[in-house]
């Protein structure tokens, strides 16, 4: 397997495993502490709703580290996005990079420097109200109708 494929698998692994290169040297080790815990998977799934790749509305199958944990990216909601299987594969093996914050606009950049953006799923008003109250924030203005996600 290629190194990028290993990084993709390690993005959201459930088990510890060692991957050895053809010459017998270990090229990747997935550790238990890099698991995305169940509660954090729920946070990412609730926030993103569907795959965050621009234009994709498929079910989330993987949590992707925007900055990979092998490159000091933290395993937290700010650095994780939900992707479908195909787009998780594309981002890694296809050489895409992602910029931005999951709570705001994300920019996906292809290896040919094509840029596409992805907007966060708007929270249901009652959920956002509760979330803001729990965080000690004042209520914000009601959402406008044009903030609804487009039908696909
Ligand atoms: Zn990934
Ligand atoms: Zn997708």
Image (tube, rainbow, N blue to C red):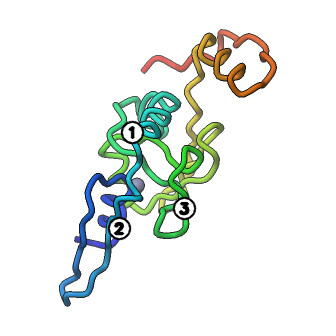
Horizontal side of 147 relative to 46 (left or right) equals right
Residue 108 in sight? yes
Q: Is mark 1 within 8 Å of ligand 1?
A: no
* Residue name at image x 59 percent, y 33 percent: 119
Q: Which residue is mark 1?
A: 38
| Mark 3 vs 1: CB contact within 8 A | no
Q: CA distance from mark 3 to mark 2?
A: 16 Å
* Residue 73: assigned label: 3
* Residue name at image x 30 percent, y 58 percent: 9
> In the displayed structure, would residue 50 be above or below residue 94?
above
Looking at the picture, tell me which residue is in the foreground, 134 or 119. Answer: 134
Q: Tag 2: Cα neighbours inside 10 Å, few (<14), some, or many (≥20)?
A: some
* Residue name at image x 35 percent, y 44 percent: 62
Q: Earlier in the sequence, mark 3 or mark 2?
A: 2
Q: Which residue is mark 2?
A: 4
> In the displayed structure, would residue 118 be above or below residue 70?
above
Secondary structure at badge 1 equals: helix
Horizontal side of 52 relative to 128 (left or right) equals left
Q: Earlier in the sequence, mark 2 or mark 1?
A: 2
Looking at the picture, tell me which residue is in the foreground, 130 or 121. Answer: 130
Q: CA distance from mark 3 to mark 1?
A: 19 Å
In this rendering, which labeled residue sits more in front, label 3 or label 1? 1
């Amino acid at each position: 397997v290629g190194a990028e494929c290993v990084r993709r698998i390690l993005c959201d692994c459930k088990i510890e495993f060692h991957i050895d290169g053809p010459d017998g040297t270990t090229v990747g080790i997935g550790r238990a502490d890099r698991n995305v815990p169940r509660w954090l998977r729920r946070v990412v799934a609730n926030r993103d709703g569907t795959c965050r790749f621009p234009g994709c509305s498929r079910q989330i199958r993987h949590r992707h580290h925007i900055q990979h944990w092998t490159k000091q990216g933290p395993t937290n909601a700010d650095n994780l996005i939900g992707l479908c299987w195909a787009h998780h594969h594309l981002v890694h093996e296809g050489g895409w990079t992602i910029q931005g914050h999951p709570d705001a606009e994300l920019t996906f950049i292809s290896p040919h420097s094509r840029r596409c953006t992805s907007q966060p799923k708007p929270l249901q008003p009652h959920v956002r109200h509760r979330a803001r109250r729990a965080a000690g924030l004042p209520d914000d203005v009601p959402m406008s109708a044009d903030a609804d996600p487009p039908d696909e």
